[in-house]
Image: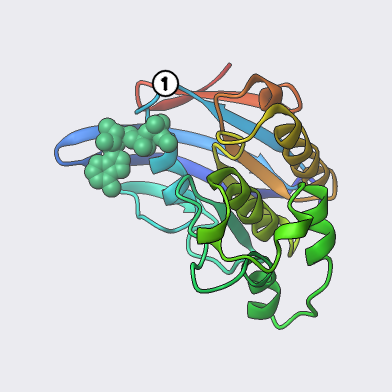
Amino acid sequence: MHPAGRVVIRAAGVHRRFGGVSVLRGVDLAVSAGEFVTLSGPSGSGKTALLSLLCGFDFPDSGSVLPGPASWTDCAVLPQSLGLATELTLEENVALPLRLAGREVSGVSALLAELGIGELGSRYPGQVSFGQQQRAALARAVVARPAALLADEPTAHLDAESAEAAIRLLRRLADDGTAVLIATHHDAVHAVADRVLVLADGQVQAA
Ligand SMILES: Nc1ncnc2c1ncn2[C@@H]1O[C@H](COP(=O)(O)OP(=O)(O)O)[C@@H](O)[C@H]1O
Ligand SMILES: [Mg+2]
């Protein structure tokens, strides 16, 4: 579905300062279609800031990024803060990328069930736990099989069994051709990655 080997996510010479502090200092990375890459690094090293640039929520002071501002089918995101629409049910949240793309809504219930929240589709985000919201946000991120997926600590609020289901789903998405980049501290996520990158001192290095 997505041509293998094509670079879908890229940062080239990216610099970003916040309030005079240089957080990203010449970041280079590339993730190709079908690749599953994890990004680790100490808290405060700039992982969230980098993902925000890659998906076009923010803009670099210098350097260039791909995909940048894009549709949900080009680039789906699972932000640390989740960003679910509180006025929509979990099912409606998950269906949103398909509706925005004018595509048939299908596979939503199956995804929720696979992530262990199959009974909760008609609830609103405020009526479920944060970990359950996180799984709904993951389902929303994968439902349209985007060209790129950026996920920020997607297993941070999950128990081991739920995390395992989430990791299996993300790995399958990459195997089906999506370029997947995940900021995480979780060894179980690094374990299934094709490559592990580390963000330290404002730059990305291979682990
Ligand atoms: N929008 C912003 N405004 C000001 N400072 C920011 C902003 N985003 C990130 N920072 C700062 O950049 C640094 C990296 O933050 P962050 O990207 O959240 O790190 P990580 O995700 O690796 O824990 C922190 O010092 C943080 O305070
Ligand atoms: Mg972060």
Is residue 90 depicted above or below 162 in this figure?
below
Residue located 24% across and 33% down the image: 22
The residue sitting at 49% across, 43% down in the picture is: 11
Tell which of 121 and 1 is nearer to you. 121
Q: Residue furthest bottom?
A: 102
Q: Is residue 151 left or right of residue 62?
A: right
Q: Quadrant of ligand 1?
A: top left
Q: Residue lying farthest left?
A: 20
Q: Secondary structure at mark 1?
A: loop
Q: Taking 40 as reference, is 191 left or right?
A: right
Q: Is residue 202 above or below residue 140?
A: above
Q: Residue visible at 80% across and 38% down?
A: 168
Give the percent coordinates (x, y) of residue 158. 63, 35
Instruction: Work out whether 7 lies above or below 23.
Output: below
As displayed, is residue 57 above or below residue 203? below
In the image, 119: left or right of 80? right
Quadrant of the snapshot with the C terminus: top right
Front residue of this view, candidates 180 and 78: 78
Instruction: Report if the beta carbon of the residue with label 1 is closer than 8 angstroms to ligand 1.
Output: yes
The residue beneath circle 1 is 42
Please state which amino acid type lies under the numbered disc 1. Answer: Pro
Q: Find the residue positioned furthest to the top.
A: 207
Q: Position of residue 52 (x, y in %)?
A: 43, 49
Res. 61 visible in picture? no
* Rendered residue at 58%/69% (across/down): 71
**Rendered location of residue 144, percent (x, y):** 73, 65
Q: Quadrant of residue 1?
A: bottom right
Is residue 97 visible to the viewer in this orientation of the structure? yes
